[in-house]
Image (cartoon, grey):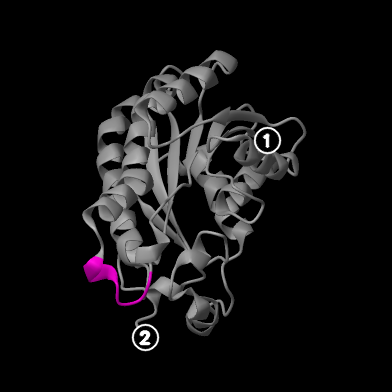
Amino acid sequence: MGLLDGKVGLIVGVANDRSYAWHIAKAITEHGGQCAYSHIPGEKNARRTGRAAAKIHADPVLYECDAGSDESLDALFENYAEDHDRLDFLVHSIAYADRDWLQMGKFVQTPRKAYLEAIDISAYTLVAMANRARPLMAKNGGGSIMSMSYYGSEKVILGYNVMAVAKSCLETSTRYLANELGQDGIRVNTISGGYLRTLASTAVGGADGLEEEAIRKAPLRRITKGSDVGSTAVYLASELSCGVTGENIYVDCGVNIIGA
């Protein structure tokens, strides 16, 4: 018996087998859950997500979605509902900011368009997806929505810049969603994962020293592994976390507790 036997859900954000979203999907599957996946439009992106998901299980179910389009989000959840009779968990693991503005010393120069785009894709999409997931989860008594944040939402991480603002917005949105969706039995939480070298993290101008800094500061004396976050996602998707909502859960080997 697995913790997630019989549970079915949607993973948004698997780009390759190094991303947190992939490790979350892997852990959920290992505990008996079934995952469907969305991918950025385009055949190349479909193949990339498909190859990564195929390392977890054969014949993964894929849906195209442009998270910046309401029509595309509508289609994603409509297509999912046509193929599945329930939605027990939703994993939001997408973020975007123009890398030109993720450079040390350039935050004050961030253009309006780049600022708003980062918040739209990285934070508003959680609200938009939660709105569409709500009726699918509510009809079966509730569910679990989770998204990925980072400590830069609270403290200055050089070069994280507008992405930090977006993650702060994401965490606040989580609390407001948790309050409104709780009446339907839907829990909403964020996981603040530690530094993990991915395609996204390498876009941050100050990222070169983050791995060494994390090892130096972490009480566990190591960097966060993808499986660490995957295990926490299993907990959040399962009934073990039935009383947990609106929380930002740190999975960073303790880096966040260290003052200097």
> Residue 143, position in %: x, y?
45, 31
> Residue 100, position in %: x, y?
38, 64
Residue 97, quarter of the rendered image: bottom left
Figure check: 250 above or below 116: below
Q: Amino acid at mark 2?
A: Ala
**Left or right: residue 237 compared with residue 155:** right
Q: Which one is nearer the viewer's eye here, 35 or 28?
A: 35
Figure check: 96 above or below 43: below
Label 1 secondary element: loop
Figure check: 67 above or below 76: below
Which segment is the magenta one? 103-109
Disc 1 designates what residue? 32
Label 2 secondary element: loop
- Residue 246 in sight here: no
Q: Which one is nearer the viewer's eye here, 97 or 152?
A: 97
Q: Which one is nearer the viewer's eye here, 171 or 44?
A: 44
> Residue 155, position in %: x, y?
31, 71
Q: Which residue lies at the image location 27% right of the left edge and 69% below the top edge? A: 107
Give neighbour class at mark 1: few <14, some 14-19, many 20+ (Cα, 10 Å).
some
Q: Amino acid at mark 1?
A: Gly
Labels 1 and 2 touching (C-beta < 8 A): no
Whether residue 177 appears in magenta in the rendering, the answer is no
Measure the C-alpha gap from mark 1 to mark 2: 41 Å
Q: Which residue lies at the image location 32% right of the left edge and 37% below the top edge? A: 127
> Residue 76, position in %: x, y?
48, 25
Question: Of discs 1 and 2, which sits in the foreground?
Answer: 2
Q: Which mark is residue 107?
A: none
Disc 2 designates what residue? 260
Q: Which residue lies at the image location 30% right of the left edge and 54% below the top edge? A: 114
